[in-house]
Amino acid sequence: MSLTETYFLGANTPEGFRSESGSLQSDPRIKRLLILKGGSGCGKSTLMKTLGARAEEYGWSVERILCSSDPDSLDGLVIPELGLALVDGTAPHVVEPKLCGCGANYLNLGRYYRESELRPLIPAIRAAKAANAACYGPAYGCLQAAAALLRARRELLGRTRIQAVTEEALGQLSEGRLPQGKGQGRERRIYLSGVTPEGLMTLDPGEGRIWSIQDGYGAGGALLRELAERRKAAGEDVTLAMDPMEPDAVAAVLLPARGVGWLRLHPAFPAPRRTLLRLDLDAALEAELPAELLTGLREMAGLERRLLEEAVAWLRMAKARHDLIEELYRPAVDFAGVTREAELLCRELFTES
């Protein structure tokens, strides 16, 4: 059963931009990786969209990797049946081949710029890039403040209370007896949630039995990590969705072979449609708290939400300024050449298969 057909490999976090794009080179499903290089507006996302649509016409499944700074744009594409992946390898999600030409190689779309037309625009391009970059400092500052409030709310609950609640919850999350597998299962990392110019997003984890965990305190990260380790020890492969607000914490554990998963939901982030509520950690953690403390915790949560909204506003401004950069570049791009490149790739990749 398929899970995670649409996801992020990068995230805007309190620590800045975090990327898992390099993990594609260690994904055992992928035998060939094309790393797209080229600046703004040169057609990287358009080429991947073209290949994805053509692959679906052939009947193959396609995984689309969205850009967290522009969810309408693609950062990557995976066609599992072909063992093929394409990824945008330019900054900020830099990807370089471990062994160039040995399963991974470059595709330079920057060669379709007509450089003579761009030279007179250099001052305008530099100014637009500076204006775009200036928006990320305030955005990440808001995320840092929101993350600090999240940690403070968790500390006010106390470690003893959190440990007692999460230990009890772990038993409730089991899906029958663990399988008796051979060897250690593998893990791969993605993001299902994102702080984006379009708002706070949680992508649909796909078809299957997905249990949601209400977790506004971020208390369930260790819980899901333990669940993942048990599954891996039983020989199952797991997909971990990391938390953009605490990028080393697990926000979801998915078992693609079983079509089963567990997803932590922060109240500020929208819930995907196909989930079943299994646990409400917030209710358990807040049970019997003094009214004064509970009021304070909820006021802090409201401030955290407003900081997240402010971060989104700055990312929206960054996106608008990035659009201006692309407007400067696009007239100087040979899009007919990019289209030919896409057609040649389709012929080469899909005819071979």
Image (cartoon, grey):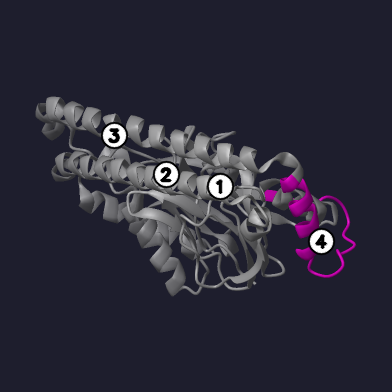
> How many angstroms separate mark 3 from mark 4 (CA)?
44 Å
Element type where label 4 sits in the image: helix
- As shown in the figure, which amino acid type bears the numbered disc 2? Leu
Which residue is the site of mark 4? 171
Between the C-alphas of marks 3 and 2, the distance is 21 Å
Mark nearer the N terminus (1 vs 4) = 4
| Disc 2 element | helix
Q: Under tag 3, what secondary structure?
A: loop
Amino acid found under the numbered disc labelled 4: Gly
> In this orientation, which residue lies closer to the viewer: 163 or 171?
163
Label 2, label 1: how many angstroms apart (C-alpha)? Answer: 17 Å
Label drawn at residue 303: 2
Mark 4 or mark 2: whose residue is earlier in sequence = 4
| Label 4 neighbour load within 10 Å: few <14, some 14-19, many 20+ | few
Q: Position of residue 331 (x, y in %)?
A: 13, 44
Position of 295 compared to 108: left or right?
right
Q: Residue 237, image x and y in percent? A: 74, 56
